[in-house]
Image (cartoon, rainbow, N blue to C red):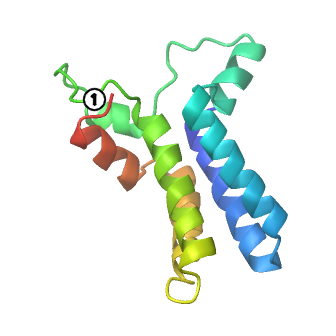
């Protein structure tokens, strides 16, 4: 499983949870993203290793677009930062500012689903450009 497939699944699950009003699924998505970000045990990488596939080509479009060998400002992986950003934005918009920003989780769901389909995630590219590894 690639990160691209994972983003597609997360986007589809997020949209399904929003459409059907499944708060328990929304909390599960947020919990999985936070646990992956904290522990760096990413589901796509674990599945790839369990299937005994080669993990040397395990990268995404942001890696291809920003391939220079510069020093990174932060020693924190951009995929981990992406997971934290998505989880934090979902918590803020769903539980604190739901009346004002009700459309933002929908926007995030469609954007993450689009990133899974196209392979280009603007947030991940921005995080890598900002200096994350």
Find residue 73 and report its horizontal and vertical position in percent: 21, 29
Find residue 81 and report its horizontal and vertical position in percent: 44, 41
Q: Is residue 76 above or below residue 122?
A: above
Q: Is residue 121 above or below residue 110?
A: above
Q: Quadrant of residue 76?
A: top left
| Left or right for 70, reference 78 | left
Circle 1 sits in a helix, a strand or a loop, which is it? loop
Q: Quadrant of residue 4?
A: top right
Query: Does the rendering let one see residue 11?
Result: yes
Find residue 79 and report its horizontal and vertical position in percent: 47, 36
- Graded by Cα atoms within 10 Å as few (under 14), some (14 to 19) or many (20 or more), the crowding at tag 1 reads few
Q: Is residue 92 above or below residue 2?
A: below
Which residue reaches farthest front?
Answer: 96
* Residue at the spot 33% in from the left edge and 32% down from the top edge: 64
* Residue at the spot 76% in from the left edge and 78% down from the top edge: 19
Query: Does the rendering let one see residue 6?
Result: no
Q: What residue did someone put label 1 on? A: 74
| Left or right for 15, reference 123 | right
Which residue reaches farthest bottom?
Answer: 99
Q: Is residue 94 above or below residue 66?
A: below
Q: Quadrant of the N terminus?
A: top right
- Taking depth in this image into account, of 56 and 98 the one nearest to the observer is 98
| Left or right for 22, reference 52 | right
| Left or right for 76, reference 2 | left
* Residue at the spot 50% in from the left edge and 88% down from the top edge: 100
Q: How many marks?
A: 1
Q: Quadrant of the C terminus?
A: top left
* Residue at the spot 59% in from the left edge and 64% down from the top edge: 91
């Amino acid at each position: 499983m690639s990160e691209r497939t994972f983003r597609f699944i997360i986007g589809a699950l997020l949209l399904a949870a929003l459409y059907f009003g499944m708060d328990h699924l929304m909390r599960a998505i947020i919990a999985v993203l936070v646990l992956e970000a904290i522990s760096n045990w990413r589901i796509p990488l674990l599945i790839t290793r369990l299937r005994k596939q080669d993990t040397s080509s395990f990268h995404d479009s942001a890696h291809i677009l920003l391939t220079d060998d510069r020093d990174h400002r932060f020693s924190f992986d951009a995929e981990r930062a992406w997971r934290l950003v998505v989880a934090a934005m979902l918590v803020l918009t769903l539980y604190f500012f739901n009346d004002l920003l009700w459309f933002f989780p929908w926007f995030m769901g469609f954007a993450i689903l689009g990133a899974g389909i196209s392979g280009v995630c603007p947030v991940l590219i921005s995080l890598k450009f900002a200096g994350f590894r």
